[in-house]
Amino acid sequence: MTGFSVTVPKNIEEALGLLEKWGRNAAVIAGGTDLVVELKDKVKSPKILVDIGRIPELRGISETEDGQVWIGALSTHCEIASSDMVKEAAPALAEACAFVGSPQIRNRGTIGGNICTASPAGDTIPPLYVFEASVEVRGPNGTRQVPIESFFEGPKKSVLSPQEIVLGVKVPKLGKEYVSFFRRLGQRKSLAISVVSVAFAGKCEGPGLFSDVRVALGAVAPTVVRARTVENALSNTKLDPKTLESVTKLAFRDSVPITDVRGSLEYRRDMACNLLYEGLLNMMECPKAG
């Protein structure tokens, strides 16, 4: 780990001023659960750390004027997993946050950090895809809303410039007739990076019948992906266990995984299909909406 200085801005404008001054020589730190590892491994060697952990505007979970759920960038995984508002509006996101790391990591790591790390294996990202969230970003030119699918450009790459910070995410509320789930597979149930993960959201029209289907796959491509092929096949199709098995196998068409130490290409594709099948099988008996 190389030498660096640390500064603690009191507000967003002060933080942005520091990032504009130092550019790529600066790194933003919040929970530090990813960045500290990168510093130790010399993946990053900033000259200054901008610690945004004391900026109050980046904290909290609330409802916006247009009926969305706003989750501040400094909200921890533990806070999100235990939030009644998130559990009601975006249950799959609360489920995902409950799986992240260890209790210590969940109490320290933030959703803003998970997004900015831009890992295709990030557990919070597939649920944000199926809820069609947007990332609120502020920089020298003001504030912009970036659809979650447009935020990521590849492994560890995003549209965020060195002069910008993530303020939080906005998650649209779905109706009570919608159901969702998050499933992941790792070398252990927790304390391990996901080998593959799946998030689902859809409007239940009756037992085995869904519309407005959204499926997102994690760790099977350079970024999290929406599984459009299987979404189209699932939408408005009356499902029984046999039909469900054949339809969920289409998930492999939307994945381009790699083979690494955590799992082979073939294994990831098979498990993506299996996780989706298992999750939907548990929701086959959902009541008709309304």
Image: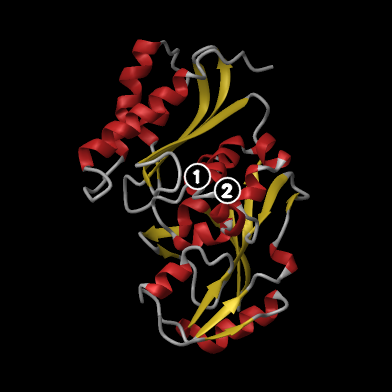
Residue 18 in sight from this viewpoint: yes
Q: CA distance from mark 1 to mark 2?
A: 6 Å
**Residue occupied by mark 1:** 129
Dot 1: element: helix
**Residue occupied by mark 2:** 133
The image position of residue 113, as x and y in percent, is 53, 61
Residue at (30, 41) in percent of width and height = 255
Most extreme residue toward the right, as rendered? 65
Asked if 10 appears above or below 172 in the picture, the reply is: below
Question: Number of marks in the image?
Answer: 2
Q: Quadrant of the C terminus?
A: top right
- Mark 1 touches mark 2? (CB < 8 Å): yes
The answer to whether 236 appears left or right of 248 in the picture is right
The image position of residue 222, as x and y in percent, is 32, 53
Asked if 141 appears above or below 66 in the picture, the reply is: below
Residue 173 in sight from this viewpoint: no
The answer to whether 82 appears left or right of 182 in the picture is right
Residue at (62, 13) in percent of width and height = 288
Mark linked to residue 163:
none
The image position of residue 35, as x and y in percent, is 47, 69
**Mark 1: amino acid:** Tyr
Q: Quadrant of the N terminus?
A: bottom left
Dot 2: element: loop
The image position of residue 51, as x and y in percent, is 61, 75
The residue nearer to you, when weighing 210 against 128, is: 128
Q: Residues within 10 Å of mark 2 (few under 14, many from 20)?
A: many
Image quarter of residue 287:
top right
Residue at (70, 71) in percent of width and height = 54
